[in-house]
Amino acid sequence: MYISVSIVPFVAVVMLSVLPVCSQDYCDTVKNKCIANLGCGMALHTFYIACSSLLSGESAECSSQCEKALISLVWAEDTVGKQFINCNCSEGDKHCEDQKLRIEVCENVRKFNKSAIVKCSLAKWLCEADTECLFALKFFEDHCSGLIRGEKCTPSCNNSLTILYQLQSAQKIMTCECDGTEDFKCMKIRRYTERLCFFKEDDIQTNAFSEGIRYSTPCGIVFITEVLCFILFIRCFSW
């Protein structure tokens, strides 16, 4: 899978008081490191699009979409996204300095609690900012088309859920809150997952996605093989 990340020379960032990362690299250098990492590159691309009006000076407000994009960038894997917080603009680069000043209005990002329950759209963005979680989410989408349509949860779909939920970067997806602003059928997928994969017939009264996965066929060996192959695929792709 190849995702083209086209971003203008730009550099982001934010003088935020979250997880300080010592980085004296110039912003262009940090940007290139982020682009070289699939998950961080996607988070940076999303940030540039969602915050375009703020970065360009057309708006002085930090929209909710911009806040989400900035959070996903800050929490991107391998701390590369976090390095944007303290990156240095090249001497005389007024464009870079202006962007850093403009993005400081996103004060709510400072209040982001990594352990708190978040909206599902943000949970998805946080997952996509991590390469392994991004692949696991794509693996789920490829193997759970029947589930997404509300038809059935196949063993391979069940396995893909297990792979996804074992990742630390996907934990937010398990507890996230559907609020109707997602670009996917959040509540329907949640209900289908609970009913078809977890065999829960009652209406969902909790935000928790998973309380254990049951298999309708003996597939332990198949599952272990799929997990090992999946992890090897991710690592080989990243290299």
Image (cartoon, rainbow, N blue to C red):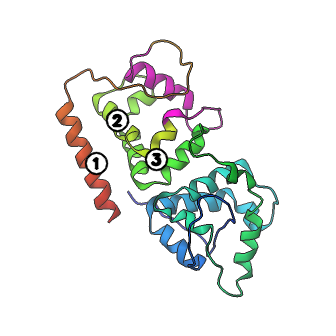
From what the image shows, is residue 191 above or below residue 43? above
Answer yes or no: do the residues labelled 2 and 1 have beta carbons within 8 Å? no
Q: Position of residue 66 (x, y in %)?
A: 68, 54
> What residue is pinned by disc 1?
230
Q: Which circle's residue, 1 or 3, is located before the other in the chain?
A: 3
Asked if the magenta segment contains residue 21, the reply would be no
From what the image shows, is residue 49 above or below residue 157? below
> What residue is pinned by disc 3?
169
SS type, badge 1: helix
Distance from Cα at disc 1 to Cα at disc 3: 16 Å
Is residue 228 found left or right of 165 in the rendered image? left
Seen from the viewer's position, the closer of residues 143 and 73 is 73
From what the image shows, is residue 191 above or below residue 71? above
Res. 167 image quadrant = top left
At a point 22% along the width and 22% down the height, the residue shown is 217
Is residue 152 found left or right of 217 in the rendered image? right
Distance from Cα at disc 2 to Cα at disc 1: 12 Å
Magenta stretch in the rendered image: 174-200
* Kind of residue indicated by mark 1: Phe
Q: Position of residue 44 (x, y in %)?
A: 57, 62
* Kind of residue indicated by mark 2: Thr
Answer yes or no: do the residues labelled 3 and 2 have beta carbons within 8 Å? no
> What residue is pinned by disc 2?
162
Res. 82 image quadrant = bottom right
Q: Nearer the viewer, mark 2 or mark 1?
A: 2
